[in-house]
Amino acid sequence: MADFNLNILGCGSALPTTRHLATSQVVDLRDKLYMIDCGEGTQVQMRHMRIKFSRLNHIFISHLHGDHCFGLPGLISTLGMLGRTGELVIHAPKEIENYMRPVLDTFCKGMPYEVRFNPVDTRSHSLIMEDRSLSVYSIPLKHRIPTCGFLFAEKPKEAHIIREMTDFYQVPVRCMKDIKLGEDYVTPEGEVIPNSRLTRPAAPPKRYAYCSDTAYNPSVIPIIEGVDLLYHEATFAECDKARAKETFHSTARQAADIALKAGVKRLVIGHYSARYEDLAALHREAEEVYPGTILGAEGMVLPI
């Protein structure tokens, strides 16, 4: 199993159906969990997929349409009942507090942990949060209300020590950290041992981009260029392109066009309209433009 995964909990759009759950995803980077959107049914799907509630510290909400945030109150309450004590940070458009504060005051009094809201400027591509492993950036999207996607960029890892070589040159333990960071080693006799002789390069850092909900929006291309995995909404088929334009959504073909022009390594589509009982047409339209398109589905786990 890769150490950087995308878990798709739900990939339906506004109307609930028995075929798809409302939008939610969990990015798993070496057991640190970051949730993207939280539609109804999210916490039940977390149970089905055996995702650990205790590992979740950050939730990113793309916009304040119900199919992307109606699951928040229930999840927050459940975390309290599970005895959570650490802070939970919700990164979202500033209006999130207008929605959530009355809910917290009414239903979540006396919770053993704090919920902190970090307002996100949906109009700019900027750093939202970072920790030791990851940086998360906003991606301005084009929708009926303020909306942004998210770019998850893994930070470069330290080089791998070649133990046989460090033993051979009797490198002290105190020097290992500097060597991992790229320093050469100088022996007590003054000989310089090149770092390349002592280490192997780490795997290149990976990037994941989430673009939902949005009309066809080429302005995202420079931001997501070359990402390892792109999730792009594909609410409609080409036969309903006029409806997509009217509602500020994308067709499957438009999603594939964005992926192709951005040179992404893999594309997964989702956020399907409830009108399609069979998704074969959407998949086919995307594949014609971007071969290998993945048809997103609940329960899917994709290595990034």
Image (cartoon, rainbow, N blue to C red):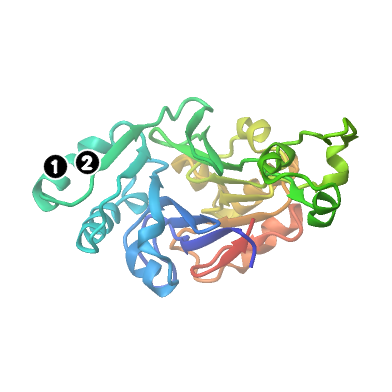
| Spatial separation of the CA atoms under disc 2 and disc 1 | 7 Å
> x and y percent of residue 13 in the render?
42, 56
Q: Is residue 42 left or right of residue 131?
A: left
Quick check: 194 above or below 69? above
Q: Picture coordinates of residue 122 (x, y %)?
A: 44, 30
Query: Which residue is disc 2 drawn over?
Result: 99
Closer to the camera, 193 or 267?
A: 193
Q: Residue at x 66, y 41 (%)?
A: 174
Secondary structure at badge 1 equals helix
| Residue 271 seen anywhere in this rendered image of the structure | no
Which of 155/61 is in front?
155
Q: Residues within 10 Å of mark 2 (few under 14, many from 20)?
A: few
Left or right of residue 7, residue 44 in this image: left
Label 1, residues with CA under 10 Å away: few <14, some 14-19, many ≥20 = few
Give the position of the C terminus as an image quadrant: bottom right
Q: Secondary structure at mark 2?
A: helix
Residue at position x 88%, y 45% from top? 197
The label on residue 220 is none
Position of residue 265 measured from the top left corner of the image (x, y, whole percent): 74, 50
Of residue 265 and residue 291, the one placed in the foreground of this image is 265
Residue type, mark 2 in image: Tyr
Name the residue beneath numbered marker 1: 102
Residues at circles 2 and 1 in contact by the CB criterion of under 8 Å: yes
31 on left or right of 153: left
